Each structure stands twice: as structure tokens, then as C-alpha cells.
Image (cartoon, rainbow, N blue to C red):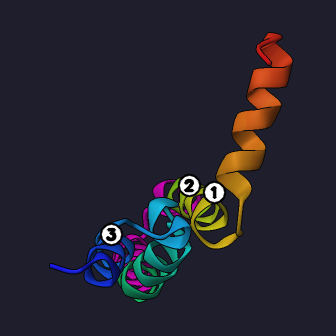
Amino acid sequence: MSHDAGILFFLLASPSPAQAELNTQRLADFLRGFFGPLFLVTVSVVALFFLFTKEITRFVQFVVVAIVIGVIFYVPNIIETLARGVAAALGVS
């Protein structure tokens, strides 16, 4: 193996800086795209069940919980913002 071939092998075998960083944005987008419609269908079916059985109190409770979960799920960076707020409130930096 010549000197040039050794350098080429080293460059190809070593990970590039872009590969070393972990980028989870595409994974998060995929999961939102996959579970988003599933979440909406589930919420709709359960809400209709509560309405047809005339359980208005449970329907209202369910809608409030679904809205909170939907905000956490659909608003970008809300989990990081909430975590920073809780850490600041607890005095953890």
C-alpha cells in the first residue's frame, strides 16, 4: 500500500464532523408526522364516544387533557422551554 493510498484510507475511515454530531430534528419531524394524525383520530373517536354516551363531564376533562397533550406534541421546542422554566424555578442551572 502506497503512502497516498494510506492517506486516502485514513480520510475515508475517519468520521467527518457532521457525522459525529447527533441531529434528532429529522427524527422528531418524522415522529410528529407519524403520530400526529394517529393522535387526532384517537382524540376524535374518544370525544365522540363521550358525547354519544352523554358523559359531558368526562368529555370536558378529556378535551382539556387532549389540548394540553396536543400543545406539548405540536408546539416546537415546548419541552425544552418547559424544562428550562422548571429548572429555573427550582434553582437548578
Q: Which disc is residue 10 wearing?
A: 3
Q: Is residue 56 left or right of residue 72?
A: left
Which residue is the site of mark 2? Answer: 65
In the rendered structure, which amino acid carries the disc numbered 2? Val
- Whole-percent x and y of residue 43? 43, 75
Q: Residue at x 57, y 66 (%)?
A: 73
- Look at the numbered discs 1 and 2 and tell me whether their residues touch, using CB distance below 8 Å: yes
Tag 3, which secondary structure? helix
Q: Is residue 19 above or below residue 68?
A: below
Q: Residue at x 43, y 62 (%)?
A: 55
Q: Please indicate whether residue 51 sits to the left or right of residue 67 in the image.
A: left
* Marks 3, 2: nearer the viewer: 3
Main SS category, magenta section: helix
Q: Using the image, determine if residue 69 lies above or below residue 8.
A: above
Residue type beneath disc 1: Val
Answer few, some or many: residues within 10 Å of disc 3's Cα (few below 14, many 20 plus, some between 14 and 19): few
- Residue to which mark 1 is pinned: 68
Q: Is residue 11 magenta?
A: no
Quadrant assignment for the C terminus: top right
Residue 34 lies in quadrant: bottom left
| Residue type indicated by callout 3 | Phe
